[in-house]
Image (cartoon, rainbow, N blue to C red):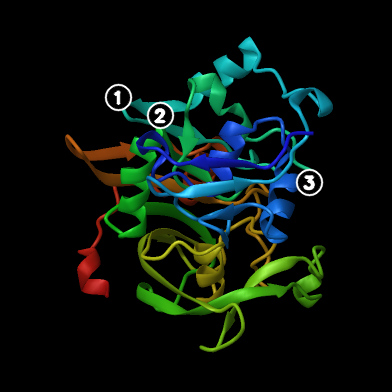
Amino acid sequence: MSGVQTCIIDETDAGSRLDRWFKRKFPHIPHGRVEKLLRTGQLRVDGKRAKGALRLETGQTVRIPPLPEPGDTKPKARISEEDVRFMRDLVIFEDQDLIALNKPFGLAVQGGSKTTRHLDGLLPALGEGCRLVHRLDRDTTGVLLVAKSAKAAAWAGKAFQSRRAEKIYWGVTNGVPKPTAGEIKGYMAKGRTDNSFGNKNANREIMQAVRHGTDGAKHARTLYQLAQTAGQKAAWVVMQPLTGRTHQLRLHMQLLGAPIAGDPKYMTDRPLPGGLDKKLHLHARSLSIPGPNGDIFIEAKMPTHMQNAFMQFGFEGQPELDDWDELK
């Protein structure tokens, strides 16, 4: 067991999240242990309690409590040649600062108590120092951005925080949203599923629409418009989130009466159209982000199950969309 340590943040680590910085420095400490150190106030920044999402600044001091030595914990999982091939096959864009992946369905971005294989753990396959810039749900596919250094993560992260990064999502909805275009906004907070609509996932954590002032409530805004419809059965919906709340798009489509097809948590009593795969039909189609050498535009091909849905409903071509600013 080591003693108490004090680390001073230098320029190369400025802009890093505290939890990710800690993981790079002490990779043998499991994620759950890091969360406990933060929760109990043992891991501190400038003498104060801190959350894992805190962005570190040059010159700050981080107190590290006594930790097990690397030999006292289980060895870190080895990155195999198969892992390297898997990760390289996901790459759709790369420059000196960033890598963009087309995340597949069902692969978690970060680990948890029951998740041992995830993208965050596979990032060493892309190179030393790679780190996630943002997240996608496990079952959402599409553009996921990775920074090659703390410096790149800092400017890319700021672009997301300042909303200068524009994300566009495509979804296939079960039914047609009403109204067919506009902005949906309001407050949302964590809740629990119930037994409505024969929900097999009863009592699981979900996000719910709540009133302003509710404990844990956060404001969420989404612009959306229909690209094409298949009668009243389904629609191809294009969405631009103006905030980045957990499950934001999924909840907002449910509130419009047309949940994302295949969503097990956010649904209505409308049965899923026959022939569709029972997978979430939500895809991060494109990302535009201002970079130090000019704007970057990245687009990701749809997964097979969404391509099949497009063929089934006759959705094709490029969507003819209104100016997003006119929907605000």
The quarter of the image holding the C terminus is: bottom left
Q: Looking at the image, which residue sits at the far top?
A: 81
- The amino acid on which the numbered mark 3 sits, given as a three-letter code, is Ser
Residue picked out by circle 1: 96
Work out whether 41 lies above or below 16.
below
* Residue at mark 2 to residue at mark 3: CA–CA distance: 27 Å
Is 238 placed above or below 310 here?
Answer: below
Element on which disc 3 rests: loop
Q: Quadrant of residue 289?
A: top left
Q: Residue at x 40, y 31 (%)?
A: 149
Residue 139 can be seen, yes or no? no
What type is the residue that disc 2 sits on? Lys
Comparing 106 with 32, the one in front is 32
**Residue at 35% across, 75% down:** 183
Earlier sequence position, callout 1 versus callout 3: 1
Q: Nearer the viewer, residue 130 or 252?
A: 130
- Residue 251 in percent (x, y) is at 56, 69
Amino acid type, mark 1: Gln
Task: Pick whichever of labels 2 and 1 is earlier in the sequence.
Answer: 1
Q: Which residue is mark 3?
A: 113
Badge 1 density bin: few <14, some 14–19, many ≥20, Cα 10 Å: few
Q: CA distance from mark 2 to mark 1?
A: 8 Å
Q: Are marks 2 and 1 in contact (CB under 8 Å)?
A: yes
Viewer-proximal residue among 162 and 42: 42
Q: Position of residue 36 (x, y in %)?
A: 74, 53
Where is residue 185 drawn, in percent x and y? 42, 78
Question: Dot 2: few (<14), some (14–19), or many (≥20) neighbours within 10 Å?
Answer: many
At mark 1, the secondary structure is loop
According to the image, label 2 marks what residue? Answer: 148
Which element is circle 2 on?
Answer: loop
> Along the polypeptide, which appears first: circle 2 or circle 3?
3
